[in-house]
Amino acid sequence: MCPPLQRREFVQQLRQLGLAPGDVVMVHASLKAIGPVEAGAAGIVQALQDCLGPGGTLMAYVSWDRSPYEETLNGASLDPAARLAWPAFDPADPRTGTEPGFGRLNAFICSAPGVLRSAHPDANMAALGARARELVGEHPLDEGYGPGSPLERFVQFGGKVLLLGAPLDAVTVLHHAEVLANIPHKRRVRYEQPVLDARGHKVWRVAEEFDTNGILDQFAQDGAMDAVETIARAYVAEGRGRTARVGGATCHLFDAQDLVRFGQAWLERHFG
C-alpha cells in the first residue's frame, strides 16, 4: 500500500491543477479515488484552504439526509403521524445531517468550524471562507438552483468547479444551466419541506423547481445519462477546463461561468 499523500504534496498538486489564492471553489470529491491522504478528509479540506488562502471560499452541495423529497413529491403525502414526527431542517444545527450519496468530504465540510449552510433543505449548500455568507445567506424554496440561489451567486463570483476524482455526473452547477436554458417542455416538480419559522416553530412549506433528476423526458429514463453528465462529457471532449492527477485520481477544474454558458447553449442548440 502506498503511504498517504502528504498535505504539502496535495497542495502542490492542487496548485498545478490551477487552484489559486482567493478562488471561490465548489468541490466534488471521491475519497476512494483520491487514495490515502495525510489526515484523511480533514487533511484534504485543510489542503484546499491552504490553496485558497484567507481570501478564498470553499463550497459544497450537501443536501439533507432527512429531506422528505420522495415522500411528498408531486402530490404524495405523509400520514399525519409521520408528518408530525418529521424533524425540521435547521441549517445552524451541527447535528443536521448531509445526503450520504454526496460523499464523506461533504459531511466533513459541514462539521468544520465556521461552516455556513443555506436554508433550502433539499438543495442546500455549505460554505467556508471569506465569501461564505454571501454565497449561502439566501436560498429561496422556489429556486433551489436558479435565480437568487447560491449557484447563481457562485457563477457570478467567477467560481471554479473542482472534481477530485468525482464523476462528471456530479457537476451540480449545470443544474443552473438547465434553469437558464430557453427550451420547451422542461419538467417541474413540487414537494414539501419542514422548516423553522421566525419563532423557531416547524412549518411545512411547498418547494417548486425544475426537475434536476431529468430536466427533459429523455434525460429521465432508467439507465440513461442525465443532462448534467451529457453536457459535462461534451465540455471535456472539447478540451475545456483543466485536467490533472491529484493523488490517485484524474481530476478536473472548470470555470463555472464558461461551463454554465456552454451548458445553456448546448441545451438550446439541441432542444430549443
Image: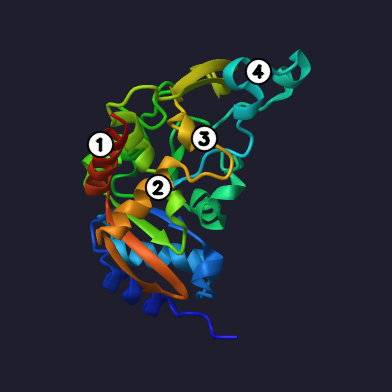
Which residue corresponds to the image point at 47% horizontal and 57% vertical from the top-left? Answer: 167
Query: From mark 1 to mark 3, how far is it between C-alphas?
Result: 19 Å
| Front tag of 4 and 3 | 3
**Label 2 vs label 4, nearer the camera:** 2
Q: In percent of the image, x 56 and y 67: which residue is there?
A: 32
Which residue in the protein does label 1 denote? 269
Q: In the image, residue 220 lies at what x, y percent?
A: 52, 35
Say which residue label 2 marks: 230
Estimate the spatial distance between the alpha carbons at disc 4 and disc 3, rounded to whole Å: 19 Å
Element on which disc 1 rests:
helix
Circle nearer the N terminus (1, 3): 3
| x and y, in percent, of residue 209 in the image | 44, 24
First in sequence: mark 2 or mark 3? 3
Q: Mark 3 points at which residue?
A: 220
Q: Which residue is denoted by mark 4 in the rendering? A: 76
* Type of amino acid under label 3: Ala
